[in-house]
Amino acid sequence: MSGRLIVISNRIPMGDAVSGGLMVALHDALAASGGIWIGAHPEAGQADDGLEEVSTAPYQRLAFRLSEIEMHDYYLGYANSVLWPLFHRRGDLVELRPEYEAAYRRVNARLARIIRQIAGPDDLIWVHDYHFLSLAAELRAAGVQNRIGFFLHVPFPALGDLSVLTHPERFADELAQFNLVGLQTRSDVARCLEMFRADPRAEFMPDGSVKFGHRITSVRSFPIGIDTAGFAAEAEKAGPNPFGAEEPGRFILGVDRLDYSKGLPNRFKGFARYLETRTDNARACLLQIAPPSREQVPAYQEITRELEEIAGHVNGRFAELDWTPLRYIHRPIARAKLARLYRRAKACLVTSLADGMNLVAKEFVAAQNPDDPGILILSRFAGAAEDMTEALLVNPYDIEDIAKAISCALGMSHDERRRRHAACLEVVQRTDVAQWSATFLGTLTTCPYPREFSDLL
Ligand code: ADP
């Protein structure tokens, strides 16, 4: 790569410590090319074209400010009350308001002006996620001709669902301004191509890329991963028992941001159904860790209330003086402790109703002892299920199916556990986060890029 890498993501690490798989992968990619990382400052401020330096070595980290109104209308509003529910198949939760979309466009346009000031002609621009769908269109309008890649971390919506948007016809147009659209799974790619196929303005090139006006866009899947070796090493480290003296005999673990897309009510009900139908008297425990997120959005307040209610019911019905079957912790947990918890669990429940990839599934597999591994129970609707076919795949809408999978995981033979875990681990090792960013950037550097229509003839 001759130029620098410029990464745009909603969040950027503010301090010296860079943690979390994606953050570390982007940090490494930037450190290697000496680039720039631009993201929104977590605190609202003066919404102007200025950038604040967050750190300088070994690459620049720069933050732009959102105003209070933009935090509300752009971030909580259009990004998280329109696009997030829409992309996670919850059209019923979409809140369309003209001021939300206006703020989204304003923020993307401002960011485009900012990037135009700093991008050199050979710099590669890598835009992350649904917060910046219209950024390439704004950059092109501002005259930026650089290679621009986009990676969508969440599922790509079905064609029919896009009609929920006020201007659904803009969606394909704006995506086609990127040179490369990266998606999590092959199913996401199929849905994206279906959208282009249905658009009379799009044509398909012999190599499968999409010609839209005078632009060509490649659409590919790049399943994201974790820092597999690092996470496994963390889990193997000896450390204090995270439970102290209160370790439950056998426990199943759930770890999720508290979000309606994670299928938590059905998970709790599936566990209750397992308790109701189990044929032994074994006292399994479900430990659910679900820190709050986006608490200002009403749909998140509603799911929080619903979960507390179901958790109360389950414990009310099954708990004994010396047994709490459902432990529900509404707080984040330090990563080292989390890694040790994963390793001690007999099973991990991932029951997302829709999920781009689901990194918890990969972290759980990486953290296991291969000689005595726990079992991953994984929703068919998580991107991770496309390749991790040896997990116990479940339909998260089907409570009976979840109950049966819990019973199957807890009773599974040692041989079968080892076989299933080895197959899942192979996937997690092969698709780790370093190869994810390297493959994406390699493809962005080499994908077809005719700058003029005449180049296509
Ligand atoms: P999403 O991006 O939708 O939140 P993922 O499963 O892809 O879902 O990623 C979640 C990340 O957040 C994982 O790295 C996971 O370890 C971390 N995480 C989730 N819940 C907690 C928690 N309670 N404490 C600490 N980290 C958490």
Image (tube, rainbow, N blue to C red):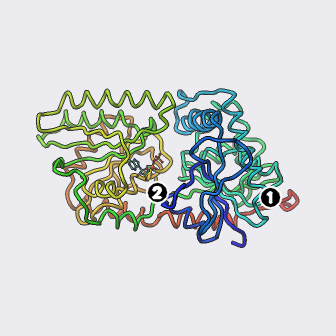
- Residue at image position (45%, 47%) is 382
Q: What amino acid is at disc 1?
A: Gln
10 Å crowding of disc 1: few (<14), some (14-19), many (20+): some
Q: Quadrant of the C terminus?
A: bottom right
Labels 2 and 1: the sequence-earlier one: 2
Name the spot of residue 425 as percent of width and height, x first: 37, 63
Ligand 1 lies under 8 Å from the Cβ of mark 2: yes
| Residue 105 in which image quadrant | top right
Q: Nearer the viewer, residue 365 or 70?
A: 70
Please say if 107 is above or below 314: below
Q: Could you tell me if residue 286 is visible in this image? A: yes
Q: What amino acid is at disc 2?
A: Gly
State the separation of the CA atoms marked 2 and 1. 32 Å
Name the spot of residue 6 as percent of width and height, x first: 67, 61
Residue 353 falls left or right of residue 216: left
Numbered mark located on residue 20 in the image: 2
Q: Quadrant of the N terminus?
A: bottom right
Residue for badge 1: 145
Q: Nearer the viewer, residue 425 or 320?
A: 320
Spot the residue most to the right: 454
Residue 385 falls left or right of residue 373: right
Q: Nearer the viewer, mark 2 or mark 1?
A: 2
Q: Marks 2 and 1: CB-CB under 8 Å?
A: no
Q: Secondary structure at mark 1?
A: loop
Q: Nearer the viewer, residue 382 or 243?
A: 243
Residue 53 falls left or right of residue 311: right
Residue 197 falls left or right of residue 363: right
